[in-house]
Image (cartoon, rainbow, N blue to C red):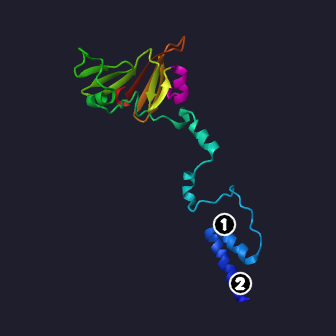
Amino acid sequence: MKNLILIGCLIGSIYAVSGDSAQIALTEFTGAAPAPSSEAVVRPAADQSNASLAVLPDTEQSAEREQPAAERELPLLTVNRVSLYDDQAAVVRKLGAPESITGDPHLSGSETYRYPDVNVYFYDGFVDFVEIPEGAEAVLIDDVLLPATLQHLKDALGEPDYVTEDGIVYERDEALLKLFFDAGTERLTSITYFHRASM
C-alpha cells in the first residue's frame, strides 16, 4: 500500500513539472484515458509582476497598433527630424544642405536654414525654433507622418494645453508645438515647434 501511495505522489510531482508528458505516464500506469488537451488552457506566468509583458491576443495587439496617436501621446521630441537641442551641424547631417541660409540684420547670431518643407531658425548655432510653412502637405512628429491639416493634427495630438488668439498649443515638458490657423476657415497657416525658454 505504501508503494502505491509513493508511486501516486511521484506521478503527481512529475505531472506538475512536465504537464502533458506526465499525463501520458499516468495513462500508462493506470490504464485511464488521457484528459482531452486544449490549447485554450491559460497557464499563469511564473512571476505575476511581469504579467504586463505577456503577449496579447491578436485582437488586442491589433487594437493597440490602431490606437490613436493622441492616446499614445507624442512626446514632441522631434519635428521633421529636428530636435530643439540640435546645432547647425546636426541639422545638416539630418536634412542635408539647406536651399538657402539667411541672417537677421537686426539680431546678431541668428540664421535661418530654409528647406522645401521646413525652416529651421538658429540662435548662436543652436535651434531656436522650427517652422512648417503654409502649404506643407505633411509633418513628421516623433517619426509619425501626419497630414498637415488642423483636424488631423488635433486628432493625433488630442486636447490642446491652451488656446491663444491665433492658434492652439501643445506642451510636452520643455517642448511646445503651436498650430496657427485661420479662425474663419480653420485652415492651417503654419506650425511652430519651440522650447518653453524661448517664450
Q: Image quadrant for the C terminus?
A: top left
Q: State left or right for residue 46 relative to residue 42.
A: left
Name the quadrant containing residue 83.
Answer: top left
**Is any part of residue 164 visible from this angle?**
no
Q: Image quadrant for the N terminus?
A: bottom right
Q: State left or right for residue 139 relative to residue 98.
A: right
- Identify the residue under disc 2: 5
**Alpha-carbon neighbours of circle 2 within 10 Å: few (<14), some, or many (≥20)?**
few
Residue 90 at x, y percent in the picture = 29, 31
Circle 1 SS class: helix
Look at 74% across and 68% down and name the residue there.
34
- Identify the residue under disc 1: 20
Farthest-out residue, top: 184
Q: The disc labelled 1 sits on which kind of residue? A: Asp
Residue 161 magenta-drawn? yes
Sequence-wise, the earlier of marks 1 and 2 is 2
Look at 51% across and 25% down and name the residue there.
153
Look at 29% across and 27% down and name the residue there.
92
Q: Nearer the viewer, residue 81 or 183?
A: 81
Q: Nearer the viewer, residue 111 or 148?
A: 148
Say above or below: 6 vs 115.
Answer: below
Q: State left or right for residue 192 relative to residue 147.
A: left
Residue 47 at x, y percent in the picture = 56, 61
Look at 48% across and 21% down and name the residue there.
148
